[in-house]
Image (cartoon, rainbow, N blue to C red):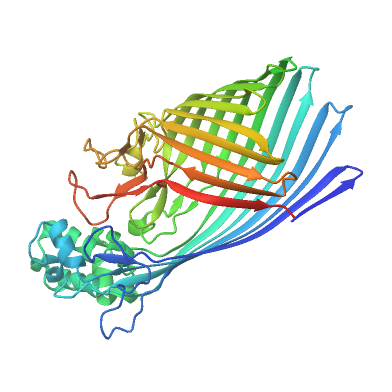
């Protein structure tokens, strides 16, 4: 909803919005041909016969309410355009997650990870079958954001403008994880074996036995209610750190965000500018069963960026062409990395990241009917060699972050070229057009991690080779533009390219890791009809 009103102080604008998003996922797959586990409710995710437990679905609901109030006007004979405003948002993320182990979990993992022909995991669990073991977990994040801001453009001279923007931001979030339900025969059976018959599990395999039979997304929370007499004896054991921990915590942060830019008009058609921006992206919670395991902090920090840009904007040939050039550099602190684990997404911070590059944008009206555009971006987006300065002895040391130092950012090709042409004309008073465009990308990394953690062992399938994709579109519209009919094709040469690559959970070890990938859209064709009333 938007409401505008003229006041003696200036133009007042209110913008309010309410959004309610709900998503339910069922994935009867662990990316293998075996029945290892399933995420969410599905025909395979049935509790063991006679069990009173029922695994639930994976449902996420996000409810967001926002309010924005702005007042703007001009002053000093229109030499100053000013704006002040307030912004408030309230967001609730309510998520339910479940994972169920299937009938080939113990046998498949025994062979795939432990190299054992016999089902040693079931033996380690005292004969308990993991089939049907599951956990249903609830995650909640409630966040509020408040900011006050101003944006002002001052004409210092007829040719020189100064832009100054300020925004003070306050963020507060409450996050929690609670286990709702579950069945944990294999996990509890493993701890029973360790407590009553420790010789049955070799010391070197005690950790793997717990980590696998107590697969953290289907494992019980480590508390006295679940573990009874075994809780106290194992409280000081590192094995307890392999189990999920409930949490109820808060996150608060504040930041002054600002931008300053000078723009100078060399001629009415050529403008140069330079600017600096200090930006902010709030931190929050990993709503994940593994987020607080071993006493880890489930929160991730805010991200800060200092960005410099110098550029030129020009209009050429009496307005028939446009050319813009910009060079930029960004220093990021606490860079937020989103990693797909094969089951869920998790966010962690990397101390430093940098991006340096140049952008060129051009477009021209070649004839009365034919126009063309050409854009080129070169970007060196990388983690510096000292991106994480913590020593491994520091409790806050994160091997996921340290492993990225000296590598490029994920899905950040150095060169990207976008070019296209459009022909427009009329036939029998109907308007029609045809458009073709292509996008070229250099090689790029597609997984979060470039190697096995803290090693030089490369992860297979990590690079998407350079490629070009072609899109086509042709359309016709009525003389009064009341309707438009378009036929289109995207990626018409059917280039199959990777979007994300990741380690498949529980399959393979270092140097022999099973890998999965999500691909981008193949060749896609369609028809679009637009109307105006």
Q: Quadrant of the N terminus?
A: bottom right
Q: Is residue 274 above or below residue 484?
A: above
Q: Is residue 226 visible?
A: yes
* Residue displayed at 10% across by 56% down: 115
Foreground of the two, 83 or 195: 83
Q: Is residue 350 left or right of residue 43?
A: right
* Residue displayed at 58% across by 54% down: 172
Which residue is the extreme one toward the front? 428
Which residue is the extreme one toward the right? 8
Q: Quadrant of the C terminus?
A: bottom right
For the image shown, how many numbered marks are present on the structure? Answer: 0
Q: Is residue 67 left or right of residue 279?
A: right
Q: Is residue 276 above or below residue 233?
A: above
Image position, residue 146 (x, y; %): 66, 50
Image position, residue 311 (x, y; %): 61, 21
* Residue displayed at 18% across by 67% down: 106
Q: Is residue 391 visible?
A: no
Image position, residue 100 (x, y; %): 31, 70
Image position, residue 129 (x, y; %): 19, 74
Foreground of the two, 334 or 295: 334
Q: Is residue 53 above or below residue 448?
A: below
Q: Quadrant of residue 479?
A: top right
Which residue is the extreme one toward the bottom? 50
């Amino acid at each position: 909803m938007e409401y505008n009103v003229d006041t003696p102080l200036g133009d007042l604008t209110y913008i309010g919005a309410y959004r309610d998003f709900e998503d339910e996922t069922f994935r009867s797959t662990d990316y293998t041909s075996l029945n290892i586990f399933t995420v969410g409710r599905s025909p395979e995710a049935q509790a063991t016969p006679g069990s009173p437990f029922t695994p639930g679905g994976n449902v996420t609901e996000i409810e967001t309410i926002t309010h924005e109030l702005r007042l703007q006007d001009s002053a000093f004979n229109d030499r100053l355009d000013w704006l002040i405003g307030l912004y408030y948002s309230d967001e609730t993320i309510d998520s339910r997650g479940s994972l169920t182990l299937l009938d080939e979990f113990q046998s498949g993992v025994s062979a795939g990870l432990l190299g054992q022909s016999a089902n040693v995991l079931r033996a380690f669990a005292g004969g308990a079958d993991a089939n049907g073991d599951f956990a249903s977990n609830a995650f909640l994040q409630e966040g509020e954001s408040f900011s006050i801001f101003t944006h002002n453009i001052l004409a210092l001279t007829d040719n020189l403008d100064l832009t100054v923007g300020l925004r003070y931001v306050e963020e507060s979030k409450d996050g929690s994880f609670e286990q709702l339900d579950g069945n944990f025969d294999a996990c509890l059976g493993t701890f029973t074996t360790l407590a009553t018959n420790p010789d049955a599990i070799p010391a070197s395999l005690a950790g793997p036995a717990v980590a696998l039979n107590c697969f953290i997304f289907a494992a019980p929370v480590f508390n006295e209610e679940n573990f009874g007499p075994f809780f106290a004896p194992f409280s000081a054991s590192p094995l307890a750190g392999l189990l999920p921990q409930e949490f109820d915590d808060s996150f608060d942060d504040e930041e002054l965000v600002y931008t300053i830019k000078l723009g100078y008009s060399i001629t009415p058609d050529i403008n140069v500018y330079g600017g600096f921006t200090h930006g902010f992206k709030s931190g929050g919670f990993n709503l994940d069963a593994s987020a607080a395991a071993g006493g880890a902090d489930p929160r991730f920090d805010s991200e800060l960026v200092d960005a410099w840009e110098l550029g030129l904007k020009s209009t050429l040939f009496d307005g028939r062409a446009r050319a813009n050039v910009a060079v930029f550099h960004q220093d990021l602190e606490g860079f937020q990395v989103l990693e797909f684990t094969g089951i869920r997404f998790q966010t962690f911070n990397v101390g430093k990241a940098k991006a340096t590059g140049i952008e060129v944008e051009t477009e021209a009206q070649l004839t009365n009917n034919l126009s063309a555009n050409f854009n080129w971006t070169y970007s060196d987006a990388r983690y510096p060699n000292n991106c994480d300065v913590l020593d491994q002895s520091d409790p806050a040391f994160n091997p996921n972050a340290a492993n990225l130092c000296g590598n490029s950012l994920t899905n950040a090709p150095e060169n990207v070229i976008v070019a296209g042409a459009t022909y427009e004309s009329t036939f029998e008073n109907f308007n029609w057009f045809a458009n073709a465009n292509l996008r070229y990308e250099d090689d790029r990394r597609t997984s979060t991690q470039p190697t096995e953690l803290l090693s030089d062992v490369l992860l297979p399938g990590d690079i998407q080779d350079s490629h070009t994709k072609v899109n086509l579109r042709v359309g016709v519209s009525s003389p009064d533009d009341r309707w438009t009919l378009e036929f289109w094709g995207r990626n018409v040469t059917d280039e199959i390219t990777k979007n994300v690559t990741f380690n498949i959970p529980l399959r393979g070890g270092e140097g022999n890791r099973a890998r999965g990938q999500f691909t981008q859209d193949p060749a896609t064709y369609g028809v679009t009809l637009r109307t105006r009333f």
